[in-house]
Amino acid sequence: MCEKLPMQNDGIVRLAKIQVNPDYLEEYMKYAVEVGTISLETEPGVLTMYAVSDKENPCNITILETYASQEAYKSHISSCHFQKYKQRTLHMVDSLLLDDVTPLNSNNKLKNYIQR
Amino acid sequence: MCEKLPMQNDGIVRLAKIQVNPDYLEEYMKYAVEVGTISLETEPGVLTMYAVSDKENPCNITILETYASQEAYKSHISSCHFQKYKQRTLHMVDSLLLDDVTPLNSNNKLKNYIQR
């Protein structure tokens, strides 16, 4: 895991809500796991990327994402690993909502990492 | 912060989705922050309790909750601090959905804590 940057005033906390086409769910999952792993392990400004799927409808994916700054977010979406994920999954995604959110308690902290 | 238990096979990962009555939002927030703080700091089986509100509609609250086991969850909902939160906010909550979820990557780990 790379060292992480501190959260800045222009940082982002977001719930990405993705509806995956059921025909592609298994394949989508592989790309999502790959991009999450590489982003967390190599990008200092990607602080959290925690993806879950509904037990009742596994095609409903929610990703808790936090970025240290707007710059960190721009760097993320221009990275090779994100562009690979985006291009290869475009046809698998039925809908995508990016809901920016505010933590209720600024002292409540998350440390997100990949266990090897 | 108390020491945390390891996640068990019968552990819970959940997105609690709460719609708060706008008349009570500020008051609700105080109870939600209180119960989250006490639960994280004192309950070994409450591994994650991270609450956010939508920027566009702050009455939409989402809480990422993980419990180490079913027993840890039962202990949580019978605790004094949870019962206080539940009873005092009942009339403030317009709707509550508990969506159990599955992490896409079992190696993707969260450590959640209160910074003092």
Image (cartoon, coloured by chain):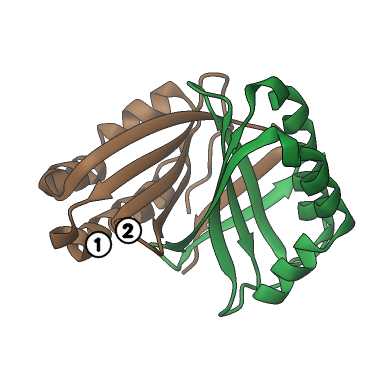
Chain colours: A brown, B green
Give the x, y percent position of residue A53.
38, 58
Q: Which residue is mark 2?
A: A33
Which residue lies at the image location 61% right of the left edge and 78% below the top edge? B8
SS at mark 2 in the image: helix
Instruction: Give the class, few, some or many, for how many residues have Cα within 10 Å of label 1's Cα (few <14, many ≥20).
Output: few
Instruction: Give the class, few, some or many, for how many residues have Cα within 10 Å of label 2's Cα (few <14, many ≥20).
Output: many
Outermost residue toward the right in this view: B80
Which residue lies at the image location 42% right of the left edge and 22% below the top edge? A70
Quadrant of res B103: bottom left
Which residue lies at the image location 72% right of the left edge and 75% below the top edge? B71
Outermost residue toward the bottom in this view: B9
SS at mark 1 in the image: helix
Give the x, y percent position of residue A109.
66, 42
Left or right: residue A54 versus residue A66 is left
Give the x, y percent position of residue A51.
41, 53
The one of B68 and B16 positioned closer to us in this rendering: B16
Which residue lies at the image location 40% right of the left edge and 58% below the top edge? A54
Give the label on residue A102, or none.
Answer: none
Left or right: residue A6 versus residue A87 is right
Do the CB atoms of the residues marked 2 and 1 lie less than 8 Å apart?
yes
Dot 2 amino acid type: Val
Give the label on residue A30, or none.
Answer: 1
Residues beneath discs 2 and 1 located on the same chain: yes
Dot 1 amino acid type: Lys
Chain for mark 2? A
Chain for mark 1? A
The one of B47 and B75 positioned closer to us in this rendering: B75
